[in-house]
Image (cartoon, rainbow, N blue to C red):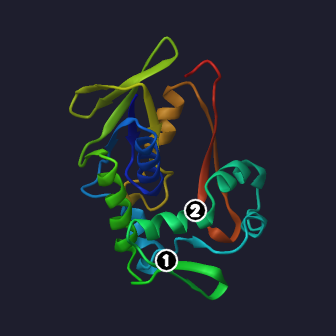
Amino acid sequence: MKVIIIGGGAAGMMAAYQAAKCGNDVSLYEKNEKLGKKIFITGKGRCNVTNACEIEELLDHVVTNKEFLYSGFYSFTNDAMMELLEELGCPLKVERGNRVFPVSDHSSDVIAALQRGLRKENVDIYFNTTVKKILIEDGIVTGVRLASGDTVKADKVVVATGGMSYQATGSTGDGYDFARKAGHKVLGDIHLGDWGYQMGLIITEPSLR
């Protein structure tokens, strides 16, 4: 199956890695000149990867609609994330408050580890390449159109473009636009308590596959 991932941040790299591990032919399109720009600045440049506490404790810090995250958190746990990065060559350490950082204190090492995973799984990566439109025929996604005008066919397209925070990193709300044009309803952003992150909530129309 041909899978296109739009966006080369944390979500996009993980989606591409997992899709490729499942035997798919994966292409990742990133409009920046490199992957993981937002990862690079997290944790004051150290990248607070995750927290080593129990999943229920993690969920207790989610202020709004934590039930939405149950499936994701239990399907791929914080322990699984730590194991993956260490397998890909990024040793980790646990600090005060169970915060997890790379031993090197360099966020670039987290990015490099994920890139090694992508190379290992033969993911095709296209830098400085902007996706302008998701192609849909009879309610089925068939591929994407690039800013160059080129069309790329695919069986599945994953939108991992982020929200609109830290726009200098490339998070300019492209995903919201893709969602609206595909017939979804964008409800807006929510704050995840003390974590300070925002998540765009989208209602999916069942007719779109």
**Residue 126: x percent and y percent?**
25, 45
Assign the C terminus to one quadrant of the image.
top right
The answer to whether 14 appears left or right of 69 in the picture is left
Secondary structure at numbered mark 2: helix
The residue indicated by pointer 2 is 80
Residue at 44% over, 79% down = 46
The answer to whether 140 appears left or right of 145 in the picture is right
Residue at 51% over, 40% down = 176
The residue indicated by pointer 1 is 43
**Above/below status of 205 relative to 193:** above
Furthest residue to the top? 138
**Residue 10: x percent and y percent?**
45, 57
The answer to whether 113 appears left or right of 11 in the picture is left
In terms of sequence position, does the residue under pointer 1 or pointer 2 come before the other?
Answer: 1
Along the viewing direction, whichever of 96 and 39 lies nearer the viewer? 96
Secondary structure at numbered mark 1: helix
Amino acid type at circle 1 is: Gly
**Above/below status of 48 relative to 34:** below
Amino acid type at circle 2 is: Ala
**Residue 155: x percent and y percent?**
42, 25
Residue at 36% over, 73% down = 109
Furthest residue to the bottom? 96
Residue at mark 1 to residue at mark 2: CA–CA distance:
20 Å
Quadrant position of residue 156 = top left
Along the viewing direction, whichever of 188 and 32 lies nearer the viewer? 32
Circle nearer the viewer, 1 or 2: 2
**Above/below status of 124 relative to 103:** above
**Crowd tier of the residue under label 2, counting other residues whose Cα lies within 10 Å: few below 14, some 14–19, many 20 or above:** few
The answer to whether 125 appears left or right of 208 in the picture is left
**Crowd tier of the residue under label 1, counting other residues whose Cα lies within 10 Å: few below 14, some 14–19, many 20 or above:** some
Residue at 41% over, 78% down = 45
Along the viewing direction, whichever of 57 and 83 lies nearer the viewer? 83
